[in-house]
Amino acid sequence: MKLSDEIRIEATRDEVFAALNDAETLHRSIPGCEELEKVSDTQFNALVRAKVGPVRARFRGEVTLSDLNPPESYTLAGQGKGGAAGFARGEASVQLKADGDATLLSYDVSATVGGKLAQLGGRLIDGAAKKLAAEFFENFQKIVGGDVPGDDEEDT
C-alpha cells in the first residue's frame, strides 16, 4: 500500500521539523496513541489502539528516524505487533518546504500488514490507512499551527 499527500501548516519549517521530533506533539497527533516514549533522538516506542474493519488491536512497536536533513526532510520507519491481529510495517519520507510564513509538508508512505489484518482485503486496509493518516495530519496541523483541538470554545 502506498499513500502520498501534501498539507499546509501555519508554522515555520523549523517549528514543523521540531514538532515532528517531539514526543508530546506526536502522542497528541497519532490517532489511538496510548503511549509514546522517546528512547533516543532517533527512536520512539509506542502503544497504539487501532480498529481496521472488524479487527481491534493494541499495537506495540517502535519508530526510527533516519536520513535526517533538518529542517527539510527525514525518513521514518515503524513496525508494530498487534498480537493475534497481526503486524504492520511502514516507512514514510517527509519533505518540508517553506511557503511564506507557513510550511508545506509532503509525505510518501509505504506499508505492509500481516496476520488477520492482511485477510481483510486491500480496499478495507487502504481506506483505514488513509483515514488514520488524514486524522494524524489534521491533528498535527491543528497542534503545530496553533489551533489546538478542544480550544474552539469561547470564554464567556
Image (cartoon, rainbow, N blue to C red):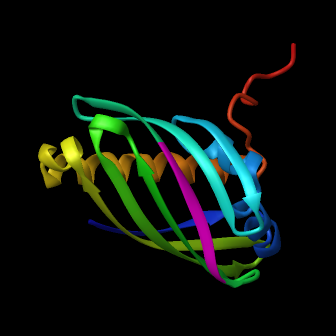
Vertical comparison of 37 with 21: above or below: above
Instruction: Indicate whether residue 66 is drawn in magenta.
Output: yes
Residue at (75%, 80%) from the top-left corner? 71
Residue at (33%, 50%) from the top-left corner? 87
Vertical comparison of 81 with 10: above or below: above
Name the outermost residue toward the front: 83
Q: Could you tell whether 81 is left or right of 33 in the image?
A: left
Q: Could you tell whether 120 is left or right of 100 in the image?
A: left
Q: Give the quarter of the figure containing the N terminus.
A: bottom left
Residue 112 pos. (x, y %): 29, 62
Name the outermost residue toward the top: 156
Q: Give the quarter of the figure containing the C terminus.
A: top right
Q: Nearer the viewer, residue 35 or 2?
A: 35
Vertical comparison of 71 with 125: above or below: below
Q: Nearer the viewer, residue 46 or 99?
A: 46
Q: Could you tell whether 64 is left or right of 6 in the image?
A: right
Q: Which residues are magenta?
A: 60-67
Prevalent SS, magenta region: strand
Q: Nearer the viewer, residue 60 or 72?
A: 60
Instruction: Indicate whether residue 24 is drawn in magenta.
Output: no
The quarter of the picture where residue 103 lies is bottom right
Mark count: 0
Residue 82 pos. (x, y %): 38, 40
Residue 47 pos. (x, y %): 55, 40
Vertical comparison of 100 with 7: above or below: below
Residue at (81%, 66%) from the top-left corner? 15
Residue at (31%, 45%) from the top-left corner? 128
